[in-house]
Image (cartoon, rainbow, N blue to C red):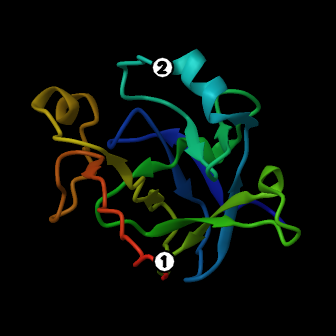
Amino acid sequence: MPSKIVRRNSMIHGQGVFATAPIRKGEEIIEYKGKLRTHAAVDDEYGGNDTGHTFLFILNDTYVIDGNINGNTARWINHGCAPNCKAFVIGDESGNPAKDRVVIEALRDIAPGEELTYDYDIQVEGPITAKDRKLWACRCGAPNCTGTMLKAAKPRTRKPAKA
């Protein structure tokens, strides 16, 4: 199946991914590829990285896909506050977290020439500082743009204890 996307310069953030042919709502566009690494290994290598630019995709509680190593075009898809795509983690049927994968799917019809975006959903604990907002700035240009890729972490729900 020929690719319907291409990487090129983006007004959002340096490089981006653009449709070269119509993409239908619900269509799987590309799988996010890269080296499978543990959270600890990624933290050791990139911890303290204050560039606001990584190609890391959290796969599950154990693993991260590092698009810096053997990554594909999917790593260039930018964040958007009004995204036309969504990233889905597909769990391995046998339950092996090392075999989970990420696919990017169209949320709506996408026209040729349109840049692909998805919500990175980067959640952080504690307050989001002005420095954090600047470092993780969003330049998607959507009317509802929050100005940052960061979100306050969702509160964890507690289950009642069983007697």
Q: Measure how far apart labels 1 and 2 are at the Cα level.
A: 32 Å
* Residue at x-position 51% and y-position 49%: 77
- Judge depth for marks 1 and 2 and give the one in front: 2
Q: Nearer the viewer, residue 49 or 137?
A: 49
* Residue at x-position 65% and y-position 44%: 73
Which residue is labeled 1 in the image? 107
Q: Helix, strand, or loop for circle 1?
A: loop
Which amino acid type is marked by label 2? Answer: Gly
Q: Is residue 132 above or below residue 102?
A: above
Please state if 121 lies on the left or on the right of 81 as rendered: right
**x%, y% of residue 87?**
55, 63
Furthest residue to the right? Answer: 94
The quadrant the N terminus occupies is bottom right
- Count up the numbered dots: 2
Give whichever of discs 1 and 2 has the lower sequence position. Answer: 2
**x%, y% of residue 98?**
81, 49
**x%, y% of residue 104?**
61, 63
Which residue is labeled 2 in the image? 47
Please state if 131 lies on the left or on the right of 3 as rendered: left
Label 2 packing within 10 angstroms: few (<14), some (14-19), many (20+): few
* Residue at x-position 49% and y-position 72%: 111
Q: Nearer the viewer, residue 5 or 138?
A: 138
Please state if 25 lies on the left or on the right of 102 as rendered: left
